[in-house]
Amino acid sequence: MGDDWIVLGRVSGLFGIQGWVRVFSHTEPRQGIVGYKPVFLHRQGEWQSFTIEEGRAHGAGVVLKFAGYDDRDQAATLIESVIAVRRTQLPPPAPGEYYWADLAGLQVVTLEGVALGTVDRVFATGANDVLVVKGERERLLPFVKGQVIVEVDLEQGMLRVDWDPDF
């Protein structure tokens, strides 16, 4: 996808009959996705610009209405589309903070210097975020600063963890 695109979520279903869609949002808070203008949807092999007319939190997710999508049939063409913005649209992270996209590709090393692999992706759970680390095998590490995650060094491309390599 390239370093220029930051995925914010995906269209997961339909909501009503007036062109609204359900969205699984990765933003924090979840309804934060509504504030980005424009957003880009990956459709038919390319990124296309879209304007969010309206949006709001709904249950555990978000519902959005895109400009020009005024009925259920039009909105159905958007299902499963990835929603992203250009990195330049994001505010810089505060000191000591980072975007999930910044973690992808970092080398994961234990405190003892054992390489576990690289961060493939991050996903949210109810308790905490989870790193998917791919090396000689796939590992799921809870993203808990101070306990599991000891240091994130973006400049060196490394993430140091307190983790048993046999686990």
Image (cartoon, rainbow, N blue to C red):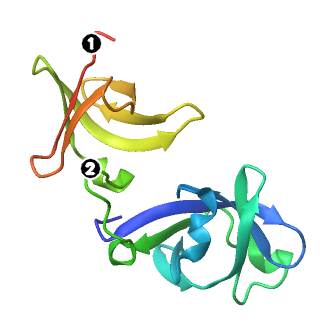
Foreground pick, 128 / 115: 128
Furthest toward the bottom, the residue is: 68
**Mark 1 sits on what residue?**
164
At label 2, counting other C-alpha atoms closer than 10 Å, the crowd grade (few under 14, some 14-19, many 20 or more) is: few
Q: Residue at x 72, y 90 (%)?
A: 68
Q: Quadrant of the C terminus?
A: top left
Q: Quadrant of residue 111?
A: top left
> Disc 2 marks which amino acid?
Gly
* Above or below 58: residue 37: below
Q: Residue at x 81, y 85 (%)?
A: 70
- Lower position in the chain sequence, tag 1 or tag 2: 2
* Above or below 111: residue 46: below
Secondary element under disc 1, as helix, strand or loop, is: loop
> Disc 1 marks which amino acid?
Asp
Foreground pick, 93 / 46: 93
Secondary element under disc 2, as helix, strand or loop, is: loop
**Mark 2 sits on what residue?**
96
Q: Residue at x 53, y 77 (%)?
A: 36
Q: Position of residue 19 (x, y in %)?
A: 81, 78
* Above or below 6: residue 149: above
Left or right of residue 9, residue 150 in this image: left
Q: Quadrant of the N terminus?
A: bottom left
